[in-house]
Amino acid sequence: MTRFDGSFEPIAVTTRSDFEESLYHGAGVAIDSSGELIARVGNPDLVVYPRSSLKPLQASAMVDLGLDLPDELLAVVCASHDGSAMHLDAVREILRRFDLTEPDLGNTRSRPLDNVARAEARAAGTKPSALQQNCSASMVAAHRLTR
């Protein structure tokens, strides 16, 4: 639902050839270490579902906890994978590195997001699985590090 009630305010402008091409609206807050609101744009009480846009921030926190992965695996941690063979192999490798298995994921069973991978999975009779779900194994791996 688009809100034109003041919940969102202008936050950025894209300029091309000295022409303001696009205006972006958003809402956000900044808080201090005690949780006190120190700055805001738009409605500070607006409920949003950031979903995958938080994955790079989550990845940073996991690396701070000790998650040590090569760049090609860390890239999957920072994004939603599409269920293609390359991405599934990367998730399997993360699981393997932390002595985890697919049932350890505990997430919703799904089919690949990628149209080709989804069609191939159906044609092969592959049932929806936690591995094909677009969230990677990194959270489970990071949890393993903190035990």
Image (cartoon, rainbow, N blue to C red):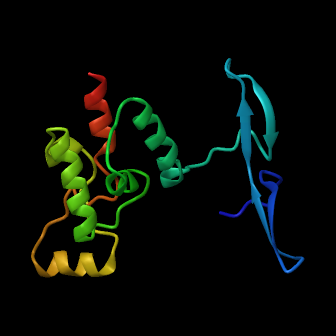
Q: Please indicate whether residue 113 sits to the left or right of residue 109 in the image.
A: right
Residue 57 location, x and y as percent?
Answer: 52, 43
Q: Is residue 124 above or below residue 32?
A: below
Foreground of the two, 51 or 100: 100
Residue 70 location, x and y as percent?
Answer: 32, 50
Please tell me which residue is depicted at 19% across the width and 38% down the height of the picture.
98
Q: Please indicate whether residue 37 sits to the left or right of residue 108 in the image.
A: right
Please tell me which residue is depicted at 24% across the width and 54% down the height of the picture.
91
Query: What is the quadrant of residue 47 in the picture?
Result: top right
Q: Please indicate whether residue 110 sits to the left or right of residue 48 in the image.
A: left
Q: Is residue 141 above or below residue 96?
A: above
Residue 130 seen in the current view:
no
Please tell me which residue is depicted at 73% across the width and 34% down the height of the picture.
30
Residue 76 location, x and y as percent?
Answer: 36, 56
Quarter of the picture holding the C terminus: top left
Residue 16 location, x and y as percent?
Answer: 81, 78
